Image: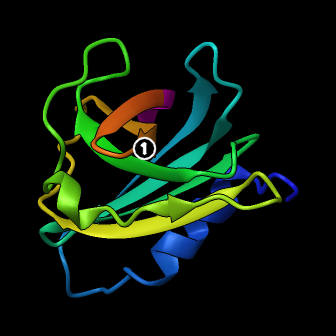
Amino acid sequence: MPRRPLHGLALLLLAGCASPTESATTLWEGSLSPVLPSTVTGTAAAVSQAGRVQVAVEIEEATAEVHTWRLVAGGCASPDRTLGGAALYPPMSVGAGHSGRAEAVVPGELAPGGRYAAQVFVTAGASERLVACGDLAERD
């Protein structure tokens, strides 16, 4: 799958959120980097508005396995709590094309100036192994 520009993923999320009567909208974007020995890369985007966060992740160079993912407070170097709880993030299936995409809507808002990261894991049974992570940056 050709890599979609990061702003394209963010625009898709914004299209479903914009409303002149709701609170301020903040846009967050980031690139996912592999956690060695993984080769998984990708993009993540989030739109925070009116008490909810719509987040999307796209990955490439992944193995044909089930991948879990989540948005966490803190950065890749110091992740903290999962926003909204892990159960709100649907698993991402990766097939022969070695790519996957998933979206979720979680309660809460991303605080301006806060630190957030998207994490992607390979899931085997009850265990998870971190394969990619990307810090999100707030966009103007």
Q: Is residue 41 left or right of residue 11?
A: right
According to the image, label 1 marks what residue? 123
Residue 67's spot in the image, x, y percent?
49, 50
4 vs 63: above or below: below
The one nearer the camera, 81 or 126, is 126
Residue 27's spot in the image, x, y percent?
41, 54
Q: Which structural element holds mark 1? A: strand
The one nearer the camera, 20 or 37, is 37
Kindly identify the residue that appears in the image at 43 percent across and 36 percent down. Answer: 136
* Circle 1 Cα neighbour tier, 10 Å, few/some/many (<14 / 14–19 / ≥20): some
Q: Is residue 127 magenta?
A: no
96 vs 15: above or below: above
Kindly identify the residue that appears in the image at 32 percent across and 22 percent down. Answer: 75
Q: Quadrant of residue 8?
A: bottom right
* Image quarter hosting the N terminus: bottom right
Q: Is residue 16 left or right of residue 127?
A: right
Write the start and end of the magenta stretch as one range: 131-140
Residue 95's spot in the image, x, y percent?
72, 61
Q: Evaluate whether residue 138 shows in this view.
A: no
Q: Is residue 136 magenta?
A: yes
Q: Quadrant of residue 37?
A: top right
Considering the whole magenta stretch, tell me its main secondary structure. strand
Kindly identify the residue that appears in the image at 37 percent across and 80 percent down. Answer: 17
The one nearer the camera, 74 or 58, is 58
The one nearer the camera, 15 or 84, is 84
Looking at the image, which residue sits at the far right? 2
Residue 96's spot in the image, x, y percent?
81, 59
Q: How many marks?
A: 1
Q: Evaluate whether residue 2 shows in this view.
A: yes
Kindly identify the residue that appears in the image at 71 percent across and 26 percent down. Answer: 39
